Image (cartoon, rainbow, N blue to C red):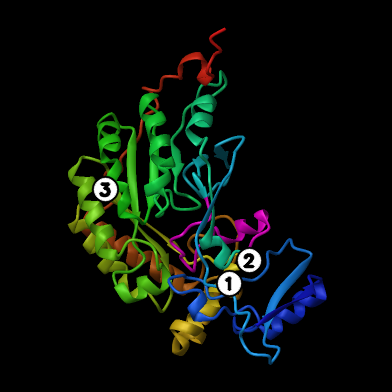
Amino acid sequence: MNARSVASSPAAVAVDATVHADGLGDHAVPKDRRRGRGAGLNPSGRFEAEAKVAFDDGWGSSDELPPFQTTVTPERARTIITRNESPDISFDRSINPYRGCEHGCVYCFARPTHAYMGLSPGLDFESRLFVKPNAAELLERELGAPSYQPRTIAIGTNTDPYQPIEKEYRITRSILEVLAKTNHPVAIVTKSALVTRDIDILAPMAEKGLAKVAISVTTLDRKIARAMEPRASAPHRRLEAIKALSDAGIPTGVMAAPIVPAVTDFEIERILDAAAAHGAREAGYVLLRLPLEVSELFRDFLLREFPDRYRHVMNVLRSMRGGKDYDAEWGKRMRGTGPYAWQIGRRFEMAAKRLGLNRNKAKLTTELFAKPANGGVQLNLF
């Protein structure tokens, strides 16, 4: 295999959209190179001047590329709290300890952010990771700023804070230690059972009304989960995590997210039933989102794993997205529109009501917040 470069011009993009309308083509990566990964493609980032594609020059495979290996690069961040003004989400600030996510969820809406690093939203996103070792230090400094006003900080809104490398780097835990010390409220979303490691921090915080956790459960089918989310915790482990957190007194919810039409949407009631039986008190859902490069990656996934459902899945999804693969309009991006989207919403609401979910949502408090000493800045001894 060799590689060739093509100009990343509007004309080239138009041709690529036609040639790769089925999600396959020059970007496809051989299975032995991507074993254990979610994406099957590794297209160049959309900001690159050239796009590199592999092709067979007929001279054999003596220079075949090695399998993708996970690499971790330290990133010296300048700030750690990210602000947003989106009217359709419930928080205005969040923290992301990592860039990229080894869970490899093929549908992840955060994949396009890797293009800002000059990397591919495909296999690079789940194998070339960045860690922020100074996250806790920055957080303490930002919380100590004279102008800072506390509101719940969300963790896990972009990449998973409990992805496998958290076992070694413990950045999420260091962040929780700062939040616990300052009595600052936090809401966590994860699909990893590793969150139970930090019950010793989260339980005392929850007792003060400072912490809650939501576990994302996309499907209860282990085969589907393994294909879509190859390195995330298995469905039964996520349910066990819900029980462990709930038993520890931590308000715990379930996120049926994303709901994939004609693949996982039939499981809505089953997921909520199982989560409630394991102690979940709250529930939410998000419809599959396919922004930018995620569309090509997901369509390739369907052709590999569910070729018989490809047309049906995409047609149903487009019926909820105004005829497109994705509609980013606020108020529509999470739920979709049209009869099918309405049906999903009503099914979810009926199941949640029957199970008593969302009846008493946990409200976190900011009244106990105590700014770090010295404004969060370490003073010099001399």
Q: Position of residue 343 (x, y in %)?
A: 39, 71
Q: Nearer the viewer, residue 58 or 154?
A: 58
Tell me the SS state at disc 2: loop
Disc 3 to disc 2, C-alpha distance: 36 Å
Tag shown at residue 295 = 1
Residue positioned 49% across, 80% down in the render: 31
Q: Label 3: which residue?
A: 359
Q: Is residue 272 left or right of residue 370?
A: left
In the rendered structure, which segment of residues is drawn in magenta?
Answer: 99-119
Q: Position of residue 280 (x, y in %)?
A: 24, 52
Few, some or many C-alpha atoms within 10 Å of disc 2 (few <14, some 14-19, many ≥20)?
A: some
Disc 1 to disc 3, C-alpha distance: 36 Å
Disc 1 to disc 2, C-alpha distance: 6 Å
Tell me the kind of residue under disc 2.
Answer: Leu
- Is residue 325 visible in the rendered structure shown here? no
Taking 193 as reference, is 10 above or below it? below
Tell me the SS state at disc 1: helix
110 magenta-colored: yes
Q: Nearer the viewer, residue 163 or 13?
A: 163
